[in-house]
Image (cartoon, grey):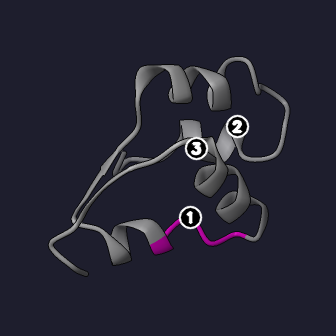
Amino acid sequence: MTNSVIVADSSPFISLSIIGQLELLPQLYQQILIPPAVWDEVTVQGAGLPGAQAVSQLTWL
């Protein structure tokens, strides 16, 4: 893990969840920030789409 901070849009969450690798993010970054609009895009507006359920269940986000 680095001492880096990342502010992410929806792409890394959706893409990494599709390939089952969401756990790479906390291994690479010390702090992961997701704006409320991105959270909504992935988990609410994207309900039923790839990544929505996996992201909504993350405990480290």
Instruction: From the image, tell me which residue sits under label 3.
Output: 55
- Point out residue 27 in the picture as x, y percentages from the top left corner: 36, 77
User: Do the CB atoms of the residues marked 3 and 1 lie less than 8 Å apart?
Assistant: yes
Q: Whole-Å distance between the Cαs marked 2 and 3?
A: 5 Å
> In x, y percent, where is residue 3?
15, 72
Residue identified by numbered label 1: 22
Dot 1 surroundings within 10 Å: few (below 14), some, or many (20 or more)?
some
User: Which contiguous range is marked in magenta?
Assistant: 20-24
Q: In the picture shown, does residue 23 fall above or below 42?
A: below
Residue at image x 77%, y 25%?
47
Residue, disc 2: 52
Residue, x 76% and y 70% (percent of image)? 19
Quarter of the image where the N terminus is located: bottom left
User: Is tag 3's residue or tag 1's residue first in the polypeptide sequence?
Assistant: 1
Q: Position of residue 7 (x, y in %)?
A: 36, 47
User: From mark 3 to mark 1, how far is it between C-alphas?
Assistant: 8 Å
- Point out the image quarter for the C terminus: top left
Kind of residue at disc 3: Val
Q: As shown in the figure, which amino acid type bears the numbered disc 2? A: Ala
Q: Amino acid at mark 1?
A: Leu
38 and 20: which is toward the camera: 38
How would you rate the neighbour count of disc 3 (Cα within 10 Å): few for under 14, some for 14-19, many for 20 or more?
A: some
Judge left or right: residue 20 versus residue 57: right
Q: Nearer the viewer, residue 25 or 5?
A: 5
